[in-house]
Image (spheres, rainbow, N blue to C red):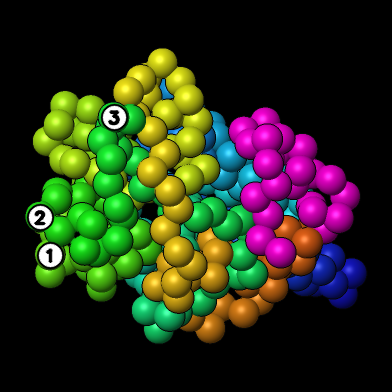
């Protein structure tokens, strides 16, 4: 009888430990419904691909965790994180002082400058004075949008978009005069047939409003998960996994130094 009780007790302990391990191994990553190639895009069969889905997969293999992706609108990512619908935002979110008031970030895992793009035949100065009276397109709820609001809203009309594709279409059709976008996303486009007629009009200057790079967002105070992610990212950079993934999409080093 004593042995039976001991066996049952041991089994209960293992069951509790197993359940705890399974719970700890599940990390829900939020991903914006709006595609953002080459960082993230969704195929017709519903599968996500791109730099960040590939990075998430490698991270979770390193952490030996199950990591389902939960689709959320871009504007809803931070609220979804705060309400525990998701555990991590690894979706091209800039680390800014404003966002750090409500969520925590890992160390940055990539960085990209902001690029002005307009019709190749259009000559313009991209200063606030040079773009006075112009219609400027930008993706909403981004650091690029924050930058434009601070310096260009008084003299120019700002038009906000949910997706890069919609913004590019409006630029090509003449509904906006110029757009500000992440260089890593837009540069491949303007070099392709789809970007015919568009040209790089220069990079925006460095500014604190652009943040200090792109990091993975976690809930305030979730230091254990943040350190797990930081350690995994550092290990992936050290063993070449990060560069292997990066080279599938970018010819230049995008890692945050």
Q: Which residue is mark 3?
A: 121
Name which of mark 2 and mark 1 comes first in the sequence.
Answer: 2
Q: Which residue is mark 1?
A: 155
Residue 29 visible, this angle: yes
Left or right: residue 61 versus residue 29 is right
Query: Horizontal and vertical percent for residue 144?
Result: 35, 59
Determine the secondary structure under disc 2. loop
Determine the secondary structure under disc 3. loop
Q: CA distance from mark 2 to mark 1?
A: 6 Å
CB atoms of marks 1 and 3 within 8 Å: no
Residue 53 visible, this angle: no
Asked if the stretch drawn in magenta spans residue 151, the answer is no
Name which of mark 1 and mark 3 comes first in the sequence.
Answer: 3
Q: Is residue 157 above or below residue 34?
A: below
Name which of mark 3 and mark 2 comes first in the sequence.
Answer: 3
Q: CA distance from mark 1 to mark 3?
A: 23 Å
Q: 56 or 39, which lies in front? A: 39
Determine the secondary structure under disc 1. loop
Residue located 30% across and 52% down the image? 125
- Quarter of the figure with the N terminus: bottom right
Q: Is residue 63 above or below residue 190?
A: below
Q: 156 or 40, which lies in front? A: 156
Q: Which residue is mark 2?
A: 133
Query: Horizontal and vertical percent for residue 133?
Result: 10, 55
- Quarter of the figure with the C terminus: bottom right
Q: Is residue 152 above or below residue 201?
A: below
Which of labels 1 and 3 is toward the front?
3
Q: Quadrant of residue 43?
A: top left
């Amino acid at each position: 009888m004593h042995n039976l009780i001991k066996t049952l007790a041991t089994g209960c302990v293992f069951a509790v430990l197993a359940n705890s391990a399974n719970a700890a191994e599940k990390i829900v990553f939020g991903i914006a419904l709006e595609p953002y190639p080459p960082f993230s895009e969704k195929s017709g069969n519903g599968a996500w691909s791109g730099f960040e889905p590939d990075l998430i997969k490698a991270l979770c293999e390193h952490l030996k965790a199950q990591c389902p992706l939960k689709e959320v609108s871009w504007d809803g990512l931070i609220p979804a994180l705060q309400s525990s619908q998701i555990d991590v935002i690894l979706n091209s979110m800039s680390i800014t002082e404003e966002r750090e008031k409500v969520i925590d970030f890992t160390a940055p895992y990539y960085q990209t400058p902001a690029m002005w793009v307009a019709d190749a035949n259009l000559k313009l100065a991209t200063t606030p004075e040079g773009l006075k009276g112009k219609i400027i397109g930008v993706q909403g709820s981004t650091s690029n949008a924050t930058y434009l609001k601070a310096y260009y809203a008084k003299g120019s009309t700002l038009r906000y978009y949910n997706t890069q594709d919609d913004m590019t279409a409006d630029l090509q059709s003449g509904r906006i005069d110029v757009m500000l976008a992440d260089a890593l996303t837009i540069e491949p486009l303007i070099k392709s047939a789809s970007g015919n007629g568009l040209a790089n009009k220069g990079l925006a200057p460095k500014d604190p409003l652009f943040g200090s790079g792109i990091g993975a967002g976690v809930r305030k105070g979730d230091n254990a998960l943040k350190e797990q992610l930081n350690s995994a990212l550092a290990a992936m950079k050290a063993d070449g996994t990060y560069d292997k993934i990066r080279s599938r999409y970018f010819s230049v080093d995008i890692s945050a130094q």
